[in-house]
Image (cartoon, rainbow, N blue to C red):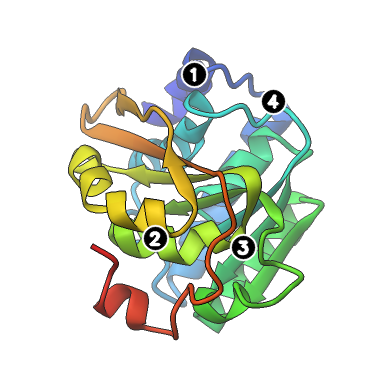
Amino acid sequence: MSKLKFKDWAADIGVELSEHQLRQFDSYYQLLIEWNNKMNLTSITNEDEVYEKHFYDSITAAAAYDFKKPMNIIDIGAGAGFPSLPLKICFPHLKVVIVDSLKKRMTFLTELSKELGLQDAQFIHARAELLARNKHHRDSYDAALARAVAGMPTLTELCLPFVKKGGIFIALKGAGGPDEKNEADRACNILGGEWLNSVSLTLPAEKSVRSILKIEKIKSTPKAYPRKPGTPSKKPIM
């Protein structure tokens, strides 16, 4: 049922999907399940649950930010491509870079991109802590995205260095989002950010709460950040 309602759900948050885009989502699901038999991409495999908890959940970012303008986005720890590839399907003009530390996921994402005919999608096998020190990526993106990767203080350290001044970091969180926002106040301040208004919504069928947290980059992140690999998660800025 979720698959049948997906187009209407998307429209409710301002995302209009064509038949071509709906076919891309169908292909996405088929490939996700096919590759999930080879590697652990997701524990959610039921079609309706994938459409609601992965596809729709990913594109809810559009309820909090305008992706209709041309922009470069980077997705940290995207796993099976969430949230950036569902957003890329909805907004084909986006230039997307996905960073993940697990190489076999890159193989899946590369094949997925080819099968869906996605342009301007790049997949980088790297640790975010190291890539953020690369001059071609630091302070370079209009938006950084993250979903279900780590706690907000850790995510802020991993993601905000990639964002240019005036850009935004968007974290897709669950019901605990407001608490995580409070926990990340110090990290937000130290790393050059300023909180914007968060957005709260409910998944249409499951009714679980989602929080979309947003940080605007107002000044450069100090050169000391992010710290060496593993440190942001072991010793988050609190």
Q: Residue 206's spot in the image, x, y percent?
A: 23, 30
Q: Quadrant of residue 151?
A: bottom left
- Judged left or right of residue 59, residue 213 is left
Q: Residue 5's spot in the image, x, y percent?
A: 44, 21
CB within 8 Å, label 3 to label 4: no
From the image, tell me which residue sits under label 2: 155
- Judged left or right of residue 150, residue 160 is right
Q: Residue 121's spot in the image, x, y percent?
A: 74, 57
Residue closest to the eye, 165 or 168 = 165
Visible residue check, residue 79 = no
Q: Residue 1's spot in the image, x, y percent?
A: 36, 26
From the image, tell me which residue sits under label 1: 13
| Front position among marks 1 and 4 | 1
From the image, tell me which residue sits under label 4: 19
Indicate the amino acid at tag 3. Ile
From the image, tell me which residue sits under label 3: 98
Mark 3 to mark 4 CA distance (whole Å): 26 Å
Query: Which numbered dot is residue 213?
Result: none
| Front position among marks 2 and 1 | 2
